Structure formats: structure tokens, C-alpha cells
Amino acid sequence: MKNQVVVIGAGLTGLTTAFYLKKAGVDVVVLEKKEQPGGVIQTHHENGFVFESGPNTGVLGSPEAAELMEDLKEHCTLEIANPEAKRRLILKHGKWHDIPSGLIGGITTPLFSWYDKFRLLGEPFRKPGTNPHESLADLVKRRMGQSFLDYAIDPFILGVYAGDPSLLVPKYALPKLYNLEQDFGSFVGGAVKKSRMPKTDREKKATRDVFSVEGGLTNMINALVKEIGEDCIQCNCQDLTVEYIDANNYRVKTGDTSIETPYVVTTSGAHTLPSMLNFIEPSMMDKIANLKYARVIEAAIGFNDWQGGDIKAFGGLIPFKENRDILGVLFMNSFLKNRAPEKGALLTVFMGGVRKEELANANDEEAREIIGRELTDLMKLPEFKPDLFKLVRYDYAIPQYGADSGMRFATVEQLEQQYQGLIIAGNLRDGIGMADRIKQGRTIAAELSEQFK
Ligand SMILES: Cc1cc2nc3c(=O)[nH]c(=O)nc-3n(C[C@H](O)[C@H](O)[C@H](O)COP(=O)(O)OP(=O)(O)OC[C@H]3O[C@@H](n4cnc5c(N)ncnc54)[C@H](O)[C@@H]3O)c2cc1C
């Protein structure tokens, strides 16, 4: 059997790549290990609740993400979160506080110290850093102060990366923030200048809008599958291996299937590559596969009749300093339609992460006890008796772009030069969010389809 491109992994990256290749007229097959496509994106329906067991929402932060939703609109409907999603809470000394949005809120908020608020006035005049491997924690302390690190950046990083700001390196993990300092010399001044710069119509498509899809994110996956064609996606592919024959000549084997192809695109996590690409020298492979991932437990918790406190917000994040046993909670039904019965609530809770990894080892009973205890206290619940309680465990949830990232990206580049036709993609590079994955898939598809013109 021959194919022009073999894509390994039917998560969002693999399916986006395949969709745009197909659109460009390139013959593609997607090989997936699990029983169904979607990767970590999976929506479930139960007793009036519609809940996700992977990502809950994305941000339309790249034009490619907005364009994909346009391209799929015949099969699924983009849902932009309602304005409640703009309200976000941070826990301080056991109480929720709104993240300030305007100047007055910024001055009066108890989240940050008076010293740091005053010191922020001098932020535009502080010299840019010179160490490209400076940690996020050091960068924020240097420019903004300890309380901004503890009660703004730290909880944000827990929410996005389940990570540790002292291990993440902004050059790789938050390149937009890093570039504000490098290009404009200041976060505050840079953000203002950037917002005033003229944008092309395409650039304007990237927004901060929080999005999902009506009925859940699986509908986006189903739309991609429909467009690609079910016959081009093969699931249940076990023990998949790739053999390098010579440049632009690979043999991909799984079960009884053997496919010869000039192009192989891997989109599975870094940890899956050593057994799959065993023609690559172990010393080189180690530099890719040593990528650390945060381990997390995700819980979807539903109540038919919500008796707890105010949940008219996107959710609440919990700074590490508060020393609680959950990372944060999302109030899903407050900003997305039809996620819970009318008087009910659907919450998503995360626990574990890089700094509390031992909590990701909790068994089901322990996890329920911990989450119940924390939610009863934090959400002012009279008792913890949910009508829905579902746990999902991820040993490789979110990749942590630390100081070793530069070496990893250079190794990927070197291998792609050495083995022409091999593309090592997925979340080991180019960003962790859904919009980043879509952008990567689209970019690879555009580059590859050029080869067939
Ligand atoms: C718990 C969690 C919460 C998240 N929350 C958000 C969020 O709120 N917002 C956001 O923007 N992003 C979020 N993300 C990140 C986002 O979900 C991912 O970036 C994106 O969905 C990953 O897509 P992917 O295709 O790169 O990887 P995956 O979805 O992991 O897909 C990779 C695929 O490769 C397959 N595979 C693995 N090994 C093999 C093999 N040997 N052979 C064949 N196939 C193989 C896997 O089975 C899988 O289907 C979250 C991620 C997780 C885990």
C-alpha cells in the first residue's frame, strides 16, 4: 500500500494536518492507537450534563484557529463563551477575589501588595533581561514583584500548564510575553504599543475569545473526521513502528498494515517516539523524549440543584502559596450553553500538576474525598453530594517547556534535516493550547502540500 503522507495520531494536531492536506488534494492516511479519534478531546453526555474529559475550552488566539472553525461550520457550530467568562477569580487567604481588569480595580485589589503596585509604575523603565533561559518566576519578580508572581502569574500557570513558574522558561513557554520585554523593553508599554500597531485582516481574526463548540468539543473532532473521510483514518493501530529506508522513503507498520510513504508526520507525545522511531540514535532521541509532562487528574462534577456560592464566572484559580489540594475549578455552565440541568451546575476541577504530583496518584476514593473537602469549603456547599462525578487521569497531560527546550527544538530540526520526509510535530514543540495545535497542523499541511505541486 502506498500513501503520499502518513500522519501518526488522530488528536487535534493530526486531524488538522490531515484536513488541510486533504483540502490541498494530497492523499493522506491517519493512524491512531486508540479506538476513536480526538486524542485528549472527548465530550461525554450523561443525565443532562455535557462534560469534557480533556480540554474544556480554547482561546481563538491564532488566525488558523478562527479559520478552522470557519472551514468546519457546515458540520459544527463555534460557541463563544458568554461574557461571564471574562470574570476570573483568584483565591487569597481562603477567599475568592476578582482578577482586576481596569485601573481602579488594579489599585484597590487586595491580590497584590502596595509595594508592588507602586513599583509597577517603574516597570516600563526597567532594563530588559539578557538571559534567554531565565525562569518565568525570575522574570516576573524582576519586572513586577513577588506578589504579582504569587497571585497573578503563578495561578495562571497552574491553570494553563499545571506547572511551576520556576521551571518554565518564557522564551519557550510564553513567547508572546518574552517578546514584549525583548522587543519593547516592557510588558506594560509593549502591550499598549502592540495593541496600537496596525493589523492585517487575517491577524485580526486572532482574539482572546474563549471558545468551544455547541454540544462539546467532540463535535469539532467529528467535523474534521467527516471532512477527512472515515476511510482515511485507521484506529486501533497497535505497536506502530516507522522504518527509514532512505530519503523520502519510509515504511510504517502496525498489525497487518504496512504502508510505504515519502512523508511521515508524528503528532503523538514525546514519550511515544522512542519505540516508534527506533532508527533514531538513542542519544538524539533522549533529548526529545526527556520532555517533562505534568500529571493531572481531571474531575467533572455535576449538581442537579446547585446549593453552593456564586459561580457566575469562568472559574477560580488557586495559587500554590494557598497550599490547597486542587489547582482550580471551572464553572462550565456559567459560560457555555446546555452543559447542566437548568438549576444545576457543572464544575471541572484539576488536581496534581508539577508541584503536587503526588496528588495525581490518589485513587478514586481518595480523589473524591479531597475534591469534596476542598469544594465544600471553597464553594460554600452545605454538603458534597454531586449527581455526576467522573475522573480522568493523565500521566502526560501538559508538556513543560523548560530550559532544555532549545536543545529539543534544535534536535528536532537536525533530525528533520537528516531524515528527509520525517516531520516530528505534536505538543513537544510550538505551543500547548488548542489554537497552537491547529496552527502547527495547518503550517505543516501548507509546507507539505507545496511538495506535491
Ligand atoms: C487535561 C487537559 C486539559 C487541557 N485543557 C486545555 C484547555 O483548556 N485549553 C486548551 O487550549 N488546551 C488544553 N489542553 C491542551 C490541548 O488539549 C492539547 O494541546 C490538544 O488537544 C492536543 O492535541 P494533539 O493532537 O497534539 O495531542 P493528543 O490529543 O494527545 O493526540 C495525540 C494522539 O496520538 C495518539 N498516539 C499516541 N501514541 C501513538 C502511537 N504509538 N501510534 C498511533 N497513535 C498514537 C494518541 O492516542 C492521541 O490520539 C489540555 C490538555 C489536557 C490533557
Image (cartoon, rainbow, N blue to C red):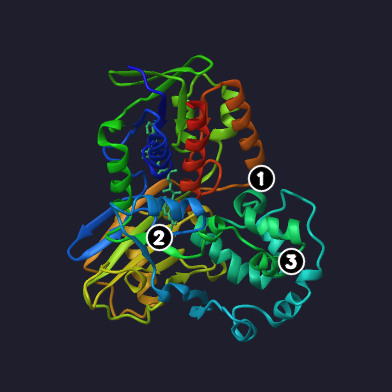
Q: Residue at image x 34%, y 34%?
A: 32
Q: Which amino acid does label 2 sit on?
A: Thr
Quarter where residue 264 is shown: top left
- Judging by the rendered image, the residue that carries numbered circle 3 is 143
Q: Where in the figure is residue 279, as x and y percent of width and height?
A: 51, 18
Mark 2 vs mark 3, foreground winner is: 2
Mark closest to the chain's N terminus, 1 or 3: 3
Mark closest to the chain's N terminus, 2 or 1: 2
Above or below, 296 against 375 in this view is above
Q: What element carries label 3?
A: helix
Q: Where in the figure is residue 82, as x and y percent of width and height?
A: 38, 73
Q: Does the residue labelled 2 lie within 8 Å of ligand 1?
A: yes
Above or below, 127 against 274 in this view is below
- The 10 Å Cα crowd at callout 1, few under 14, some 14 to 19, many 20 or more, is some
Q: Where in the figure is residue 35, as x and y percent of width and height?
A: 26, 37
For the residues marked 2 and 3, what is the alpha-carbon distance in whole angstroms?
30 Å
Mark closest to the chain's N terminus, 2 or 3: 2
Quarter where residue 415 is shown: top right
Above or below, 316 against 59 in this view is below
Q: Residue at image x 46%, y 32%?
A: 266
Give 134 or 203, whichever is nearer the viewer.
Answer: 203
Q: Residue 65 carries which label?
A: none
Q: Does the residue labelled 1 lie within 8 Å of ligand 1?
A: no
Give 25 or 263, whichever is nearer the viewer.
Answer: 25
Q: Which amino acid does label 3 sit on?
A: Arg
- Judging by the rendered image, the residue that carries numbered circle 2 is 57
Q: Can residue 363 be seen in this view?
A: no
Quarter where residue 305 is shown: bottom left
Q: What residue type is labelled 1?
A: Ala
Mark 2 vs mark 1, foreground winner is: 2
Q: Which mark is residue 403?
A: 1
Mark 1 vs mark 3, foreground winner is: 3
